[in-house]
Each structure stands twice: as C-alpha cells, then as structure tokens.
Amino acid sequence: MSLDCARPGALWALLLPFVFLALVRLVARPPERATGTLELWQELAPERPSGARARGRFPPWALLTALALLCAALAWLGPRGARAAAPRAWTCVVDRSPSMGLPLAPGAGTTRLAAALASAEAWLAENAASDERVRWLAPERAPLELARGTRPPGDWLEPETDGAEPERGEPVWERHDRPGTLWLTDRAPRAERMHAGLFASGGAAVPGPIAADARETVVWEDGALRTEARPRSFAVLVREAAPGRLPPVLERMLTAWCAARGFELVRSPRADVRLVIEVPALAGSAGELALARDGWQATGTVARRAAAPDPAEAALRPHEDWLVGRAPGGSEHAAVRARRGHVEVLLGALSEPAGDPALFALSWARLLERSLLCAPGVLALEERLAAGEALVAPGEDAAPEAARGRDAGSDLGPYLDAGLALAAGLAVAVAWLGARATDRRAGGRPPVEPWRSRRRRNQ
Amino acid sequence: MARGTLELPSPGVRFAPDFLARVGRLIDRLASQRERREGDGRARLFGVGSEFVGYRPYRSGEDLRALDWNLLARLGRPFVRVAAREASEHWVVWLDTSASMGVGVPGKLQLGAELATALAALGLARRARVELWLSGGARPLALEKRVGLAPWMRALEGARASGRSGLAALLARAPDLGGAGRVFLIGDLLDLEPPAAAALARPSRELFLAQILAREELVPAPEGAVRWVDAEGGGARELWVDDAAAKGYERRLGARLERWRRTAGCVRAAWGCWTSDTPFETLVRELCTRAG
C-alpha cells in the first residue's frame, strides 16, 4: 500500500507537530513551585525520572496538541491510498483499418501498424512497470490481456484487407477515451481525445488501385485517377449443407447476377471468392411465413440453423437480418442474414415472388453488391492518402487510474479528510479538558478529612 | 542554584476590611449555639466564668478535687463537675512564621493569622488572657482587652513568612507556658515531630494542633515536570509529576499525617489538617464544636 495525497503542497504542515514539541521543549521550562514538603518529594525522587529525564518528557496536553496538529496536517494533505501492489492495467486500442497495413512510405519495409506499435511499446517500456498488464483491443477481435512487452499475435493485429469498407477496422475511439488507454493508429482520429494517449505512425501517401471489378481497375496515382482494363477472376461461392438446398428462384437470380457482373458461380472454395452464399442445415421449421421487401412479396418456410454458429465469431462479426418472415400469429423469424462477404440463407423453400419480378432481382442485387468483398490490393482512396507526421501524445493523465489512486481510496478521500479533521478537533478538546482536569485536580479532590483526631467528648 | 531564590507566593498577611465583622458574627453565632446547647447538661469548651455547666465521666489522671462524690455514692460511677473556665484563664497561641508558611494562595500564614486573631477575639469574649507567640522570635504579644486587637492585627500584618524558625524553635520556650490552660499550635507542623508537640500536653491543659498546608502540598496535581523548591532554602528537586508520583507523594504525606493523628490521640490533643484556602470560620467552628 503506497500513499498519495490530494494536496502535496501542504506537505510542510507535517512538520508542525515537531516544531510545536520543539517549542514546548525550549520555552515551557518546568514551573517552579515553593513547598514545605520538599523532603517528601526527595524521598520519592529515586523512583521517579528527574532532571534531564523529566525535561525530556512532554506533558499529556502537549502530546495531544501535537497529535491534533498531525491530524490537521494530514487532513490538509488529503492522504489517498493507492493500491500499488495491484498491477496497473493499461489498454492499447489498435486501429485495424486497411491503411494500417500500408507501408510507412513507398518502398519502406515497415508498415504503419508496426510503427505505431513500436512507438507505443517504447513508451510503455518507460512508463509501465514490468509486472503490469496490457489489454489489447481492436475491432472484430477478442480482447487480449498480455504482460507488458508482449505483442499480440500477427493474425490478431492484421489490418482489414477489405478496402471497400475501411471504417470497419477503425475503433470507435470515443468509447476508449480513458486514462491508461493508448490509441494506436496512423493519423489523429477526429474524435476528441481527453484522457487517452495517442500514438500515430503517420505515413506517406501510397498510390494504387482504389476500385476494381472483373473487367476494369481504377488506379490512384500522382494525385489523379486512371482506369485500367485489367480482367480479373472473381467467384461467388454457394456453400450448401446438401445439394439443391438453395431455393430455385434464388439460384436463377444468382446465376443472372453473376453473369451480369462477370463473376463465376462456384460450389467449392477458391482463392478469388469475394462472396459466400451459405445455406446451412436447418432444423425446426417455423411454418410458412410471409416474406416481403423492397416491393416484392413471397411465401416461404424458415427454420433455425441446425448447428449454432461460433459465438465468438458471431459476436465479433454479426450478421444483419436482411429478410424477415412474418408468421400469421405476428411472430418474426430471420430468413436471410448478411454481413460483409457472407450471405446466410435460412429459407427451406421460397415461392415465386408476386408482382414485378424486376423488383425481386433489384432487391437481391443490392444485397449482393453490398456484401461483396473488395478485390485484393484495392483500397479506398482515403486510405491511400498521406497520414501526416508521426505523433506521440501520451497525455497528462495517460497512466491508468489505479496508478494515481483513483480507485476506492479516492472515493473515500473526502470522508478520510473529514475524519482526520474531526480527530484533530477531538484531540484539541481532550487536551484542553485534560489540562483543565489537571488544574482542577488539586482543587476538586477533597483534602484529608480535617480533624482526624478528636478529643473524646465528655459524657 | 541557577535560578536563585524563589519568591514565595504569599509571604505576608493582609486582613480584609470586613474581617473583624466576620469575627464578630462568628462569635455571636457560637454564643447562640452555646445557649441552645446548655440545656442538655453537656460541658462546653468555651463556657463563661465559673458557672456549673454539667457533668462528664472521670478520666484517669484527672484532679480528684473535680470529682462529684455525691454522684459517685449514688451511681457508683465517677463523674466530674464541669464548670465554665475562669475569667483569668490563660490561652497561648503559637504561630509559625517560617518561610514555608508563605506557600499557597492564600498563604498558610494568612490563614494562620486569621485563625490566631479569631481565637484571640474568642478568648476575649471568654474573659481569657491571650498571648501570641510568633516563631520568628518577636516578643509575645498579650491581649486582655478588646482594644488590644488592633495592635495584635498590626503585629500580624507586619509579620513575614521568612527564615527557618518554625514552631520547633518555640519548643525551647515551652517552660514559659506556665499555667496556660489552652495552647494552640498553628502552622504547617512540618518542622516538628509529633512527640515533641505532644510533650506540651498536661492534664490541666488542652492542646490544639492546627496544621495548615497549601492545597498543592496536600494534593499535588499530576502536571508533568515541576521544579520543587524548598521555601526555606533547603534545596530543589525537579520531578515528573504524574498520577503515580502524586499518589506516592500523598501516600508518604498521609503516613506523616497519620502519625500526627495517632500521637494527638494519645495525649488527648486535638489535631486537624486544613488547606490554606479554608475559611477561618470553619476552623474556629470545628474547634468550638469538637473540642472537649
């Protein structure tokens, strides 16, 4: 248990009790009392401290007054307990935007992520104790708590590669603006930073593709955009629990969309897959439901997945319900769910849509376009822009709260101050009463009964 | 002694303007009490003249001439006729004026002087001849008429608590007491051994020992370091006075007072101990009420 204080400027007040006792020693010489019974005191002398020893002791009122001064000085100081024994927990929030994977400068061997990590680790090495822990946070990654000096695994740190949606890898900085938190990014976020430290790698602009489809690629270079005719092979993978599980109406629509976009519809994994259509094994049908979206209607059967998805994966990269079936009783069941690069179809059967078939095709095409992964090497233009100079700003209160005693001890601080002030007051009162009692003792105690000896009365 | 001689807190005597009035009221009250009590046949110390006031049991060693033979014949037990003292009774007051009597506030000498004067006034009222002997060596002051009270009080106001001569010094003049019927020793009795004082007692003489101590002498306060200085220049001692020290002191003083009590009892002398801030009326009333 180490101690901190709320008002370090009052440290000098701790000297007051000692100054007071020194003054008492110097000024308050023992009072002289004339007596006719010195002989009795001298008989007592061998049993009692005398001379210098007598002067070396302080009367109770002086000790109590010194105690009161000590309590008052402590109350002024405002002692705060800090649990130094408990290791402080630092937090590093890592930006996994695609830009973090870019080289620090064209041709440089180190990435922006590596530079930001190195900067933060160097600062932690100086400011954090070796036994302290660091909690690592990043979007779509499970939190890690590691010893200081230990870096998370490479795949955990790996920036997002889907350049079409760069914000997906960027933390919501506002949620992590706390003391003891270090933001690791390549440029200062727009979010206002109050407590957290910032370790930005900076970095030069990195020219390259910013958009691509099966036929053309848009390249940003020298501050200008140009289009290159660069045929690419892209695939859409249909992953079925059993062959023929994908409803025929969806199969037809998917085939048409792939043909229009130049994608190949495949049923076995490939390296150039940019979208997975998954039709898992289903269990427990909810019956025939009404399905409607974007102006089309149909009916279909919906069921739950037979095997629950990985909860960690589901928590980190949740799906969005795109199509919901409504039962006659009013209950709703997810029929189609989607996330980036993945569409999950939970339909057992799907009727031909009523109304204009184009509405049905457009609705599904928008879902598929939105879910497509970006082509490898393609990054949004804003990711490729220069990130500026490197920036290290740990902030005044970058240390975790525990390091500055703002734990339970700080909450009790005002009460502790009040208690010490009360103790000082009590000590003064007791000193005063004690001094008065000492003065009164001679006057208040009944003396020896007068006339201990009486002459026998005449009868 | 590095700090030189210590100034005594109350070395002198100063009678309050209303002192004589207080003495007068005290004597009147005592007289009225005596009148109320005479009916019960018990003897009173401060009776007037030679009038018969009652009987009391005979005590071994008493003058057989006082024995009432008629009562002895009728009751088979000896009784002594008690009469008020003769007008010619002789009282002697010894007052300690040594330096130790200047201790206390008010001082021991102040109370001693007030007691001596009140006793003198009482003696005059009882037609006694009162003599005041001061331990400082001054000539005895005799008082036979009330007009002599003023010089008496002036003499006392001129006395100072000083020197080492206390009541022990007056013992050498004990033979001069002659036929004094009552002898009052007023002082702190610290320079006197109880047997020496007891030697003044006679069958025909009543001895009164009024021991006056300062309050801090009787009950010291546990006030920490104190430098105790002998008022008569006998040295000094610095001590830490806490509860234990105060109790140790009181134990020793108590043993000494107990010796006084036992010795006084043996010779049928009256002894008492008061603090110097006790009103003199209290002391006189105790004497009048209690003494045989």
Image: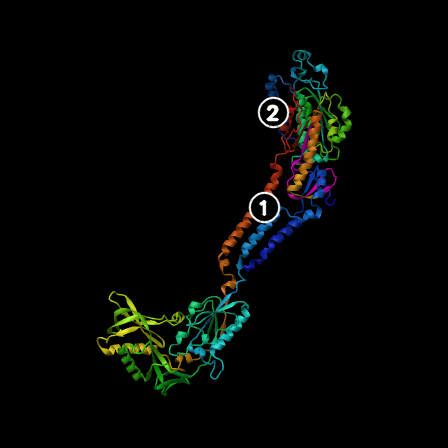
On residue A202, the disc is none
Chain where mark 2 sits: B
Give the labeled residue for mark 1: A431
Q: Position of residue B165 (x, y in %)?
A: 75, 33
Q: In the depicted view, which residue is nearer to us: A447 or B35?
A: A447
Q: Which residue is mark 2?
A: B25
Say what amino acid the circle numbered 1 marks: Ala
Disc number lying in front (2 or 1): 1
Name the residue nearer the viewer: B202 or B126: B202
Tell which residue pokes out farthest to the bottom in this image: A229
Q: CA distance from mark 2 to mark 1?
A: 45 Å
Relative to the observer, which residue lies in front, B123 or B225?
B225
Vertical placement of residue B265 versus A56, above or below: above
**How has the structure been colored for display?**
rainbow
**Residue A166 falls in image quadrant:** bottom left
Chain ID of residue with mark 1: A
Number of disc labels: 2
Residue count near mark 2 (Cα–Cα under 10 Å), binned few <14, some 14–19, many ≥20:
few
Quadrant of the image containing the C terminus of chain A: top right
Residue A61, image x, y percentages: 61, 46
Amino acid carrying mark 2 in the image: Arg
Asked if residue B220 is among those painted magenta in the image, a careful observer would answer yes
- Residue sitting at x 74%, y 41%: B235
Label 1 sits on a secondary structure element that is helix
Q: Is residue B5 above or below residue A274?
A: above
Residue B187 at least partly seen = no
Start and end of the magenta stretch? B209-236
**Residue B42 in view:** yes
**Pick the front one: A221 or B122:** A221
Residue at far front of view: A242
x then y, percent, for residue A434: 59, 43
